[in-house]
Amino acid sequence: MAVEEKTQQAITQKKGKATPGRRTRKVKNVKSEPQGNTLTRPLYMTVDYFVNVRSELNKVSWPSREDTRRLTILCINVTIASAIFLGILAVIWSEFMRIGLNPGNAWMLLAVIVAMVGGAFFMIRRGSI
């Protein structure tokens, strides 16, 4: 029993001081003074910038040529398909607005809107979208 108490005390023994938090910790400033004088400092800063850019670009995991080609074709196809879809939708919607603005055809516009909302709801419930 005495051995267990000593181990327990050793484990739970306090340090006598608080652990410093990250907010109160002093951070060493690596470059406190810029290099050079007023004339050469921009040159040093520009060179340092491009050195940092090069080191970051070396860390990048670039896709292969086949991946780049495949993703570019996919992006172009999706852009063309969405442009065609939105163009057709705009033409249909403008025709419905032209037809629906006549006083006798207001019910037709309402029916089309209800059908579109109902179709979208049905497709969402079915899991197509």
Image: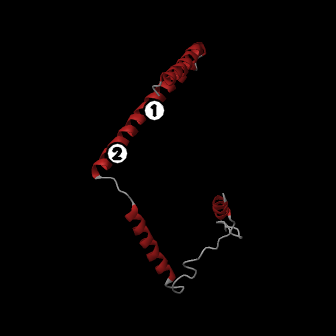
Q: Secondary structure at mark 1?
A: helix
Q: CA distance from mark 2 to mark 1?
A: 22 Å
Q: Position of residue 96 (x, y in %)?
A: 52, 21
Identify residue for label 1: 86
Q: Quadrant of residue 19?
A: bottom right
Q: Is residue 83 above or below residue 58?
A: above
Q: Quadrant of residue 7?
A: bottom right
Q: Position of residue 71 (x, y in %)?
A: 34, 45
The structure's colour scheme is: secondary structure
As drawn, the residue found furthest toward the left would be 66
Q: Is residue 34 left or right of residue 23?
A: left
Looking at numbered disc 2 in the image, what kind of residue is underneath it? Leu
Q: Is residue 108 left or right of residue 3?
A: left
Q: Residue at x 31, y 48 (%)?
A: 67
Q: Position of residue 113 (x, y in %)?
A: 55, 20
Identify residue for label 2: 71
Q: Is residue 25 left or right of residue 123?
A: right
